[in-house]
Amino acid sequence: MTSHTSKSRIQGEGDYESAQKYNEHAKEFAQSGKVEQAAKEAAPSNAQEQDDMRKAEAEGRSHAKGQGKVEQEKGSPGRTAPTKQAPGKHPEGYNPTPEKTPGR
């Protein structure tokens, strides 16, 4: 991390100037019409390269926050799906009386 005397520049995870530059460049690239060509150039050129890319993606996803082990093994994207329950419903079919906390 570099030290700057200016308080307007925040470095580290809050480096707003760099984030703004990135967003501007990404927007310019998206609007340039070169996205499809870049995607074709980045595509794997053979089966071995495709397999290597899948393995690398699975490795990266295994480090992602909020992903369950089963999904990591499958290599599926995203987070684990939450268990859906109606609000206020107890999993065993009854609503226990909440315990009173002393001093409240």
Image (cartoon, rainbow, N blue to C red):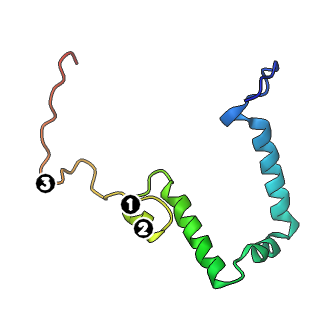
Tell me the residue at 55%/69% (across/down).
Answer: 55
Tell me the residue at 12%/42% (across/down).
Answer: 96
- Dot 3, how many residues are within 10 Å of its Cα: few (below 14), some (14-19), or many (20+)? few
For the C terminus, the image quarter is top left
Q: Which residue type carries mark 3?
A: Glu
The residue that label 1 is drawn on is 69
Q: Which residue type carries mark 1?
A: Lys
For the N terminus, the image quarter is top right
Circles 3 and 1, Cβ within 8 Å, touching? The answer is no
Q: CA distance from mark 1 to mark 2?
A: 6 Å
Foreground pick, 26 / 104: 26
Query: Residue 73 sits in which quadrant?
Result: bottom left
* Percent coordinates x, y for residue 27 in the rendering: 81, 56
**Mark 2 secondary-structure assignment:** helix
Q: Which mark is residue 73?
A: 2
Foreground pick, 20 / 40: 40
* Percent coordinates x, y for residue 88 in the rendering: 24, 47
Q: CA distance from mark 3 to mark 1?
A: 26 Å
Circles 1 and 2, Cβ within 8 Å, touching? The answer is yes
Is 76 situated left or right of 103 in this image? right
Foreground pick, 62 / 16: 62
